[in-house]
């Protein structure tokens, strides 16, 4: 097992990884920007090294500085968390060339799944159903028109290198296609330096349902059930829950088995998430994320497995030691992503935390690096906390979630807690009757607004 792990991230996820390491008796090395010198992940790690100025490209994305920190402090392995370098195949190769273990999948699998066109082909070849669309990249307006005519409107134009909902544009009819195509391409160039796009049928009322996969280096693969992440704003998840109110145990076992078998066939290891859209009883693959997800705690709540611990064990070469039948699914869990933003306008609200009181009690988990007096920097993502609640059933979970949201005190800046309070009290949400467009209609926003 590793003796020291470098945590190449910040905020709640750096703390989350720090916790798993300490419970395993592993020492931790925090790396941080100058803006994060007072951050909780820096205080709670065993060692800390400043790797650069506030801007992420100079610090948390600075590969050379991170590798130097690992070398100087004699770390054995690097955990990337999510975001930043977590899905950067080039970084994974460099980590390995320097003699460290990357706690995540291989560079080859990250590269494959990072190219969404190649990923779609690869999973289709191993039995996963995909959204009907173009056979590969669509190069030019003429081809886009032909593809749209074939798959039928509405269509979605998506960046091959996409992520975070960028480079994605819908066209409802032929009149909208040219503008949508051009916007998608220029957004893809601006965000990813790669203008390659492909097309899919735009599903009208799907749910976003993703399966958590865990695989070791010895061919053992299990699925840990699904997460329903249909509550989204601008293609970004806001609330996630497991199990999905739309699935029964038979469907879960069927599609979970297909996803796990596919992952085994491609020789993948570590955690991974196979994302689907689910409409009228049918699943359609959209992408596979080759990292730990923000929403992993809802899966931990209902399976009682520590996913970060499992990632570390797998990276050290240990076998899973259990099989699919050993995985329990108990209770119901919901996560609210709490952002430092105005709950009505969604504009970021950086500032200094005044009074701080996180909720607690049975079944309540708060993953956050906040503390009273902490100054939330404006340089990074606006998510400041995750509230995860477990109940023995969905109703108990909802009652507990309402109670916990009401207890949460974060003074000094605006947060999305009032939005979450409205969402979890909405009759459609309480009835589990929602799809990926529901939240934007609820808050009165246009889809691409
Ligand atoms: P990204 O990598 O940018 O997150 P995804 O392919 O995972 O892109 O899609 C993100 C979200 O966009 C999905 O959760 C869903 O809400 C929406 N989406 C993606 N593909 C489609 C589609 N074919 N039809 C309707 N909505 C889609």
Image (spheres, rainbow, N blue to C red):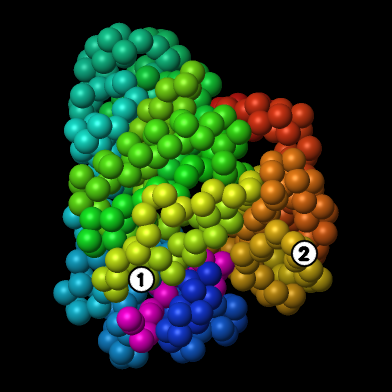
Residue 377, quarter of the rendered image: bottom right
Circle 2 residues within 10 Å: few <14, some 14–19, many ≥20: few
> What's drawn in magenta, residue-wise?
1-15
Q: Is residue 401 left or right of residue 348?
A: right
Q: CA–CA distance between discs 1 and 2?
A: 30 Å
- Name the quarter where the N terminus is drawn: bottom left
Rendering coords of residue 192 (x, y %): 32, 47
Instruction: Give the quadrant of the C terminus.
Output: top right
What kind of element bears circle 2? loop
Judged from this view, the residue extending furthest toward the left is 97
225 up-or-down from 35: above or below? above
Quarter of the rendering containing residue 357: bottom right
Q: In terms of depth relative to the viewer, which is nearer, 98 or 211?
A: 211
Q: Which residue is mark 2?
A: 361
The percent coordinates of residue 98 (x first, y second) are: 19, 78
Mark 1 lies on residue: 313
Whether 338 is among the magenta residues is no
Q: Residue at x 25, y 22 (%)?
A: 134
- The percent coordinates of residue 96 (x first, y second) are 20, 72
**Secondary element type, mark 1:** helix
Is 10 colored magenta in this rendering? yes
Q: Mark number for residue 215? A: none
Give the x, y percent position of residue 196.
25, 35
Left/right placement of residue 282 relative to residue 232 reads left
Considering depth in this image, is 219 or 191 the residue closer to the camera?
219
Residue visible at 80% across and 63% down in the picture? 409
């Amino acid at each position: 097992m590793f003796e020291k792990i470098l945590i190449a991230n910040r905020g709640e996820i750096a703390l989350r990884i720090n916790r798993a390491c300490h419970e395993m008796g592993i020492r931790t090395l925090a790396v941080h920007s100058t803006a994060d010198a007072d951050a909780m992940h820096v205080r709670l790690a065993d060692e800390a090294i400043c790797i650069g100025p506030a801007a992420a490209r100079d610090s948390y994305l600075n590969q050379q500085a991170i590798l130097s920190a690992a070398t100087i402090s004699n770390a054995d392995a690097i955990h990337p968390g999510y975001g930043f370098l977590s899905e950067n195949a080039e970084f994974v190769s460099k980590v390995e060339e320097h003699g460290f273990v990357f706690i995540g999948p291989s560079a080859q699998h990250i590269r494959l799944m990072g190219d969404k066109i190649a990923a779609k082909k690869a999973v289709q070849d191993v039995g996963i159903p995909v959204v009907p669309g173009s056979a590969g990249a669509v190069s030019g307006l003429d081809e886009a028109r032909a593809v749209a005519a074939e798959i039928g409107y509405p269509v979605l134009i998506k960046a091959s290198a996409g992520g975070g909902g960028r480079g994605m544009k819908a066209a409802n009819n032929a009149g909208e296609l040219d503008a949508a195509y051009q916007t998608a391409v220029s957004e893809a160039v601006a965000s990813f330096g790669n203008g390659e796009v492909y097309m899919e049928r735009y599903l009208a009322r799907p749910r976003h349902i993703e399966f958590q996969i865990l695989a070791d280096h010895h061919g053992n693969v299990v699925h840990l059930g699904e997460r329903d992440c249909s509550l989204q704003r601008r293609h970004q998840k806001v609330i996630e829950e497991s199990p999905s109110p739309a699935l029964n145990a038979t469907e879960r076992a069927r599609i979970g088995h297909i996803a796990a078998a596919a992952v085994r066939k491609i020789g993948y290891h570590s955690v991974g998430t196979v994302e689907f859209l689910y409409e009228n009883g049918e699943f359609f693959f959209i992408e596979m994320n080759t990292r730990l997800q923000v929403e992993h705690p809802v899966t931990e709540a209902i399976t009682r497995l520590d996913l970060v611990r499992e990632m570390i064990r797998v990276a050290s070469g240990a076998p899973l030691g259990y099989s699919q039948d050993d995985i329990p699914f108990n209770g119901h869990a919901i996560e609210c992503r709490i952002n430092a933003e105005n709950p009505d306008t969604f504009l970021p609200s950086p500032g200094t935390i005044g009074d701080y009181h996180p909720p607690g009690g049975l079944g309540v988990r708060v993953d956050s690096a906040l503390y009273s007096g902490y100054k939330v920097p404006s340089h990074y993502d606006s998510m400041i906390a995750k509230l995860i609640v477990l109940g023995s059933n969905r109703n108990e979970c909802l009652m507990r979630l309402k109670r916990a949201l009401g207890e949460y005190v974060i003074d000094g800046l605006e947060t999305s807690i009032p939005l979450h309070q409205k969402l979890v009290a909405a009759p459609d949400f309480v009835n589990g009757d929602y799809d990926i467009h529901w939240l934007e209609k609820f808050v009165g926003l246009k889809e691409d607004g």
